[in-house]
Image (spheres, rainbow, N blue to C red):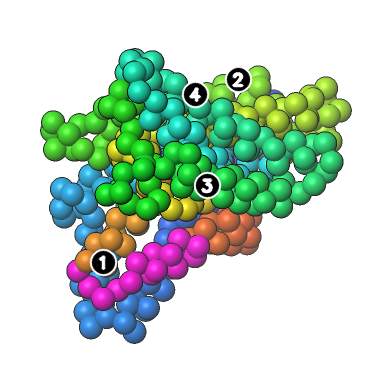
Amino acid sequence: MNKILQKLKGNDNPTIRVEKQFSALRLILAVLIALLIAFLLMCTISEEPVRDLQTLLVGPLLKKSRRISIISKLIPLLFTGTAVCLINSAGQITTACEGAFYFGAVAATAVAIIPGIPSGIHIPMCFIAGAFFGAIIVMIPTWFNVRYNVLTIVVALLVTNVFVFFGQYLILHPLKDANPNAQADVSKLFEKSALLPNLAAFGYKRIHLGLLIGAVIVLFGYFLLYRTPFGFEIRSVGNNQRFSRYSGINVGKTAITTALISGAIAGMGGTSEVLGLYERFMYTGTTNHGWNGIVIAVLCKNNPKFVPVAALFLAYLSTAADALNSTSKIPPEIINIIQPIIIIFVAASRLLAPWEHRAIVRASQKMIEKEK
């Protein structure tokens, strides 16, 4: 009996093992169902649906420019995916990372256009500005939830709109390029000292230092969440606030601190994207990177360890949509159909539940018989 109890506490727990197997199976099934629906839609639109399905599956790998595009689109998702994993783990369901990403880019722009700052200082200053305002934006809805028990998602939607419109005002007025040859809604040019280094010398201009920073952010998020006492407090608060409170954890402080960290990461993502890809601020509205961060968090079950894989998957889908749009009459909205279908089936914990339950029972019985 003692051996059985030890295995139940460790990695040999059959319940945990079977749950992991069925989570992977649900993901595979979700992708297959989404692809099947996409193919059926292609049959109604395209004259060559088989060729278009092939483009969807392998098109992003056939050209160097598309492969570079995948990595380029992956970079901001490393930030927002990790940010949403952290805040969701604390039990705060929020969309504020979208606003934090956008306004983080605006704040970085305000610093990036300042002349006369050395490169070694200018880039960190931009990231500090983006992280500061990103942290504030994500913290506000969580503070209202902790202080006044207001639904986080409601305040997050309002706060995001406020900061997006405020950011647009800043770009169109104080930060606007007065040059008549410039576009109507762009900022002044960034100083060279503020631009992130890229691999342009090797033909990879769209791959910049943000990739390395994003990888460090993912490692930081995983280490914080699963290798520190504070990470245990975050997950405890997210799983059961009442139990956490009785255990002596300051629930409000933990949630607000997590929101600050999450927002700072999202704001840094906006900073990395705008300074790595552009020479001036050119967004006309939200970028959907925050929303995609929510998709990634769902796919990862809020575990930052899997953020690179989920981000790569979304970046691949987005590049496939571009490839379809350039080689056929298939609109890119097909990809917008595939993504929510995958999310629905991955999030459907009751999908395959009867088979999962039977598998757990069989695995438990086998373990007991083996130890007798």
Q: Where is residue 168 in the image (x, y as percent from the top left)?
A: 50, 48
- Name the residue carrying label 2: 228
Q: What element carries label 1?
A: helix
Q: In the displayed structure, does residue 330 sit left or right of residue 100?
A: left
Disc on the earlier residue, 2 or 3? 3
- Crowding at dot 3, Cα within 10 Å, few <14 / some 14-19 / many 20+, comes out as some
Disc 2 and disc 3 in contact, CB within 8 angstroms: no
Which image quadrant for residue 202? top left
Disc on the earlier residue, 3 or 1? 3
| Closer to us: 90 or 117 | 117
Q: Residue at x 17, y 34 (%)?
A: 200
- Name the residue carrying label 4: 128
**Camera sees residue 19:** no
Q: Which residue is drawn at 50% across and 42% down?
A: 170
- Name the residue carrying label 1: 324
Rounded to the nearest whole Å, what is the CA distance between mark 4 and mark 1? 39 Å
Q: Where is residue 330 in the image (x, y as percent from the top left)?
A: 30, 73
Comparing labels 4 and 3, the label whose residue is closer to the camera: 3
Disc on the earlier residue, 2 or 4? 4
Q: Residue at x 76, y 49 (%)?
A: 151
| Closer to us: 123 or 147 | 123
- Quadrant of image for the N terminus: top right
Comparing labels 4 and 1, the label whose residue is closer to the camera: 4
Residue stretch rendered in magenta on the structure: 327-341
Q: Which amino acid does label 3 sit on?
A: Tyr
Q: Is mark 3 on a helix, strand or loop?
A: helix
Q: Is 36 one of the magenta-colored residues?
A: no
Q: Which amino acid does label 2 sit on?
A: Thr
Disc on the earlier residue, 4 or 3? 4
